[in-house]
Image: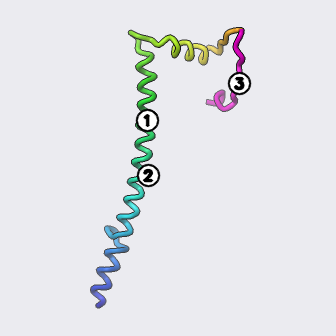
Amino acid sequence: MCLIAYFCYHAVQGELGLLSYVRLERQKSALEVEAAAVSAQRAALEHRVRLMAPDKVDPDLLDELARYELGFAHPDEIVILNETLQKN
């Protein structure tokens, strides 16, 4: 009886037991969600890089980057300063 109890305990609580399997499945799901988010972020960054390719520059992106880096604005535009953007 003790031998059966020992194996049942380790089947549930052991390093390769049922509870470890459930914990690993939850961790796997969380990592899959994180991987999907990182993949989407990478795709967005790759798209922006493709828009800045030397042979074909997107004029809108060039205008946006130049305005941001140089701090320029047209006279008829309203500029709203955001402190969180300035810290980055």
Q: Which residue is mark 1?
A: 40
Which quadrant would residue 28 be assigned to in this image? bottom left
- Secondary structure found at label 1: helix
In contact (CB < 8 Å): disc 3 and disc 1: no
Residue type at the position of mark 2: Ala
Q: Which residue is mark 3?
A: 81
Specify the segment rendered in magenta: 76-88
What's the distance in space between the residues labelled 2 and 1, CA to CA?
16 Å
First in sequence: mark 2 vs mark 1: 2
- Secondary structure found at label 2: helix
Label annotation for residue 68: none
In the displayed structure, does residue 76 sit left or right of residue 53? Answer: right
Residue type at the position of mark 1: Ala
**What secondary structure is the stretch in magenta mostly built from?**
loop
In the displayed structure, does residue 78 sit left or right of residue 33? Answer: right
Q: With respect to residue 72, does 85 lie above or below? A: below
- Secondary structure found at label 3: loop
Label annotation for residue 30: 2
Mark 1: give few (<14), some (14-19) or many (20+) Cα within 10 Å.
few
Mark 2: give few (<14), some (14-19) or many (20+) Cα within 10 Å.
few
Residue depth check, mark 3 versus mark 1: number of the one nearer the observer: 1
Residue type at the position of mark 3: Leu
Q: Is residue 75 magenta?
A: no
Q: Residue at x 71, y 19 (%)?
A: 79
Q: Residue at x 62, y 14 (%)?
A: 70
Q: Residue at x 28, y 85 (%)?
A: 4
First in sequence: mark 3 vs mark 1: 1
Q: Residue at x 44, y 16 (%)?
A: 52
